[in-house]
Image: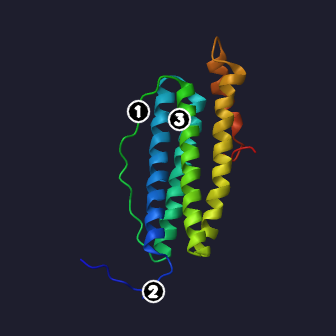
Amino acid sequence: MERQQVTAKRSLTQATEDLLNRQIMMEGSSSASYLSMASWCEMTGYENSAKFLYMHSDEERAHMLKIFHYVNEAGGHSIQPEIKDIKHHYNSLREVFETILDHEIAVTNSINEIVNHCYEIKDFTTMNFLNWFVEEQREEETLARRAVELFDLIGEDGVGLWTIDKEILNLIGADGDAEA
């Protein structure tokens, strides 16, 4: 069935729409992964890390929806991502946070790729929209890096893991934003 088109033209190219839909998938996958990590943390007794990850799961879903709405408002068609291959078990709390850091770096690279694409085709509207995500990713990477650094600073022996779990929530401000 052919899509009924209410507006005759749009400035969002198909290539940009495809890249943004890929980013929607990535943000949705982030949300699902963080939710799974939160469950693992809660199940293994890392209560503060679980709270941290539940909040981040919600935040990643909000990021997904922000892009989702933008694509539709720009005349494109956002696609609900199919989320699969989510990891449910981890060997350690450190592995959880190292996975987060690796993932946030991949998200940053993906956002940068879309921004570069928009720059090359002179889609400054989408590029401007994505500037928020560029800054957000700097904060996300910094937060993930700080979490991983706790393992080296505090150590995992004795009460180290308990202390790290307590410190995880100190990495975010009262309103849930990363402290820079």
How many C-alpha atoms fall within 10 Å of the one at disc 2: few (<14), some, or many (≥20)? few
Q: Nearer the viewer, residue 78 or 52?
A: 78
Q: Which residue position holds label 2?
A: 9
Q: Residue at x 70, y 21 (%)?
A: 154
The quarter in which the N terminus is drawn is bottom left
The secondary element bearing badge 3 is classed as helix
User: What is the crowding at mark 3: few (fewer than 14 residues within 10 Å), some, or many (at least 20)?
Assistant: some
Can you identify the residue that label 3 sits on? 99
Q: Nearer the viewer, residue 42 or 110?
A: 110
**Distance (Cα) linking label 3 and label 1:** 12 Å
Q: Residue 32 placed where, x, y %?
A: 44, 44
Q: Is residue 17 left or right of residue 154?
A: left
**Mark 2 vs mark 1: in front:** 2
Measured in 3D between alpha carbons, the distance from the residue under mark 2 to the one under mark 1, in whole angstroms, is 44 Å
Q: Secondary structure at mark 1?
A: loop
Q: Nearer the viewer, residue 36 or 16?
A: 16
